[in-house]
Amino acid sequence: MKTNKLFILGVAVMLVIAATSCKKYLDVNQNEDQPTSVPPKVLLPSAEGSLAYSMGGDAQRYTSVFMQYVTGAARQFYSFNKYSMNEEDFNNLYNNMFADNLHDMNSIIVWGNNHPGQYTMYQAVAKILSAYSLSQCSDWWGDVPFSEAFQGFENLHPKFDSQQDIYTTCFKLLDEAIDSIDYEVNTAGDDLEYPGDAGDDFVYAGNDAQWTSFAYGLKARLHLHLTKVDAANYQNALDDLAAGGLSGNGDDAVFPFSASANNPWSQYIENRDDIAYDGTCLQDMLTNSDPRYAAYIDTAGAQSWGPGYLSDFFGAYTSVIPFFTYTEQKFIEAESKLMTGDNAGAQAAFAEAIQASMDRVSVPAPEAATYIAAHGTLAGTQSDMLGQIMYEKYVALFLQTESWTDWRRTGLPALSPNPDGVISQIPRRFIYPTNENVYNPNCPQNSTLLAPGLWWDM
């Protein structure tokens, strides 16, 4: 109970700060108010909550506009819907990801290094979540600071590592985490596997097998991102899944919000409400008689916010924010098998992916079966079949930032830019934020929503 109270207090403070979207924050390299020594059992739950809030907050809202899951209808989001964004709009997300999430996870890793054998699982979890957070930041901004980051006043101007180096770092972190879980020997201390400490982990409650599965699934995702760089990464992704990966929807890596620490979409609807829950994706779902539509949008006005708003699966106070799901993993498998010539394997994974998506949002079995019978068979050329896979993945990953990465690396689904946009293309990257531009001379200058291109997006 003490841990839960600490977490709720910490997240409540964090949410108040993060929700104030127009204020500036301290530069990510300045931590004047940061305690010098905080144990992992305090850091981990707040770091997980902060990461979930970041992912379900600006990150999902911005990319959901780009991917036409939702439509900016008023105030800031009316401008964002026209791709009118500047460096100020990215300050909060950047600072939350680096000064909060990645900084805290780095502190856990350092603590583990200073207490060998005592905090093995905490450290492994921190490495997995660091790889997750760092890869997200690099997929949004490209080059980002890491190798020289988190040193406080010893280095206020860390260099920006290349995106290629960032990916190398992410794979290294994941491999180290997997290896340490496989060979962990807890001699003493206060690790996640000790009785009473599982409550410090709100994602998997200290389950080492599930964390290992998440690590392998994340490796597969990252290899898939690099297929434009080298098509051999399709097979690398399949090798990752053969070595591990999630075994079902019950293994999804999600963060559960609560009545005390609310889901960020619910907060946004309650406090701002300048997004319309309509767009290309939802309109296509209606055209295809997709039974998930009623699981995504409250059509009857019987849920938290009224007809036309997000359903309680996505928008209730206690809705989870996903980091990685079995549904996504099956689509990774389907695409990778298709692109390595295994059409039969691709077909099987494709149907299983759609079924997993249906099950995840509790679509009744007969309705799911009808939809899969009509839309779940791959046909045509390899390009045609890839289009089918990517469309269904787009629908299944509703609101998730990964869809934007999928679209940038494949061009699928084929979306038309907003004709009223201030730029003629759908954005392909985030802009470096004001604070980093001003305070770190190593920050790349003159970024836009289109340039410079990301390493894997060339």
Image (tube, rainbow, N blue to C red):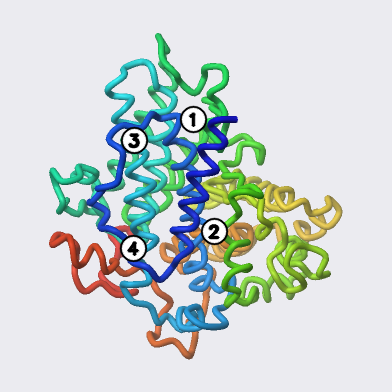
Mark 3 crowd level (few <14, some 14–19, many ≥20, 10 Å Cα)? many
Which tag, 4 or 3, sits closer to the chain's start? 3
The percent position of residue 377, horizontal first and vertical second, equals 69, 57
Q: Position of residue 161 (x, y in %)?
A: 21, 51
Instruction: Answer left or right for 440 relative to 84.
Output: left
Tell me the CA gap for discs 3 and 1: 12 Å
Q: Most extreme residue toward the bottom, as rendered?
A: 420
Work out whether residue 394 or residue 44 is closer to the camera in this orientation and state it: 44
SS class of the residue under badge 4?
Answer: helix
| Left or right position of 193 against 186 | right
Q: Compared with residue 124, is residue 164 higher up or lower down, i.e. above or below? A: below
Farthest residue to the right: give it. Answer: 366
Circle nearer the viewer, 4 or 3: 3
- Residue 212: assigned label: 1
Classify the position of the C terminus by image quarter. bottom left
Amino acid at dot 2: Gln
Label 1 or label 2, whichever comes before in sequence order: 1
**First in residue order: circle 4 vs circle 1:** 1
Check disc 1: other Cα within 10 Å, few if <14, some if 14-19, many if 20+.
many
Near-viewer residue (403 or 180): 180
Q: Name the spot of residue 195 as percent of width and height, x first.
A: 56, 17
Closest to the observer, 222 or 206? 206
Q: Is residue 304 above or below residue 361?
A: below
Q: Amino acid at mark 3?
A: Leu
Residue occupied by mark 2: 400
Which residue is labeled 3 in the image?
173
For badge 1, the amino acid type reads: Thr
Residue under label 4, please give it. 457
Closer to the chain start, of discs 3 and 1, is 3
